[in-house]
Amino acid sequence: MPVTNTFVFTPDELRSYTLGDWDNRSAVRSKNSTFLLPPDAEIRLQLQTKKWFPQAFIPYLNDNTIQTSGEHIQHRLAANHLVYFLRYTTLLEHKIVNRSVETLIHEELGVELPQTMKLTALQLYTDEGYHALFSFKLSEQVAHFYDMPTWEAPPKRITLLLELMDATRDAHRPLTWFFFGFVSETIIAKELLSITGDTLISTVYQMFREHLEDEARHSRYFSEVFRYLWPKLSLAQQEHFASLLTKIIFIFAEVDEPWLSASLAGVDIPLLEVTRIVQALQTLDVRTQRARSIAMGTLQAMTRAGFFELQTHRKLFSQSGLIDA
């Protein structure tokens, strides 16, 4: 039998929930952005005071070896990270998030959804396609500016998610896709919300701001769908997917060691230092803290849905280190 709790929707909530004034607020509908980098001379001028990527999300740049390697090396590593992030975003939006949204649009979950939620899913699907487009366009320009070699291997997180899906029973796949999207869309790091045009290259700042404006609404949407869906699952389903959610969260906190090692080696960081820097990011404590940090929004959404009202769920997540006991 489905688990019941007090976290339920009223009829008015079901009728009114949307992505807000989507036609006038969604970037794909309301913006005329080209996401073109300025001329090379202007980029070099901006790099005297601005950066390619938010510093809070590339903590390895604070390593003493990199700090003493010179500003040019730091800019190149940040540009490498930006291109990797944008190409990862393109794949994430297409292969993971929009596949997750399809489960809502095409009624694959085995739970009847309100019509308003399905219409909103179609709007979100459109947004994500646009995010993939402008991420791809910008990544190509930054890669061209530095004449970067192409990194052919898929991002580690994408690979791990798809491997997890391959190992999932057919009956569990639609809900697994949904939970991939739920975690992906509720991970909005608070540091990104404080980005200003004074800190980033102008086009990069424009991209982040427009993406974040959409993603904040997407996060609310996935949180509400989770809140609607979770109490309708059976106890057996809840037990299975509670365990799965811990795995998904940790996947989204993964560091892509092969790519990062190649990025560092590509600017002539000594091999022993590369190994030390990468290994420092992969200790158990660091991995757990990283997962807790990125999943703050996800865990809050789960709390609002009554997820942690069951002691077994609280114990599972506390044992994994994602919440306090």
Image: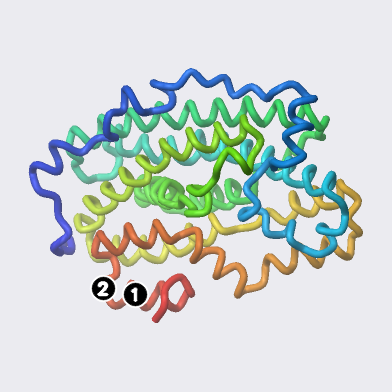
Instruction: Write down the residue under mark 1.
Output: 314
Quadrant including the C terminus: bottom left
- Badge 2, how many Cα within 10 Å: few under 14, some, many 20+? few
The residue under the point 26% across, 60% down is 304
The residue under the point 21% across, 45% down is 111
The residue under the point 67% across, 31% down is 139
Residue 153 shows up from this direction? yes
Residue 154 shows up from this direction? no
Quadrant including the N terminus: bottom left
Which dot marks residue 310? 2
The residue under the point 52% across, 53% down is 191
State yes or no: discs 1 and 2 in contact (Cβ < 8 Å). yes
Secondary structure at numbered mark 1: helix
What kind of residue is marked 1? Answer: Arg
Measured as percent of width and height from the top left, residue 63 is found at 77, 63
Question: In the orientation shown, which residue stands out farthest toward the left?
Answer: 11
| Residue 137: quarter of image | top right
Which dot marks residue 79? none
Secondary structure at numbered mark 2: loop
Q: Nearer the viewer, residue 287 or 293?
A: 293
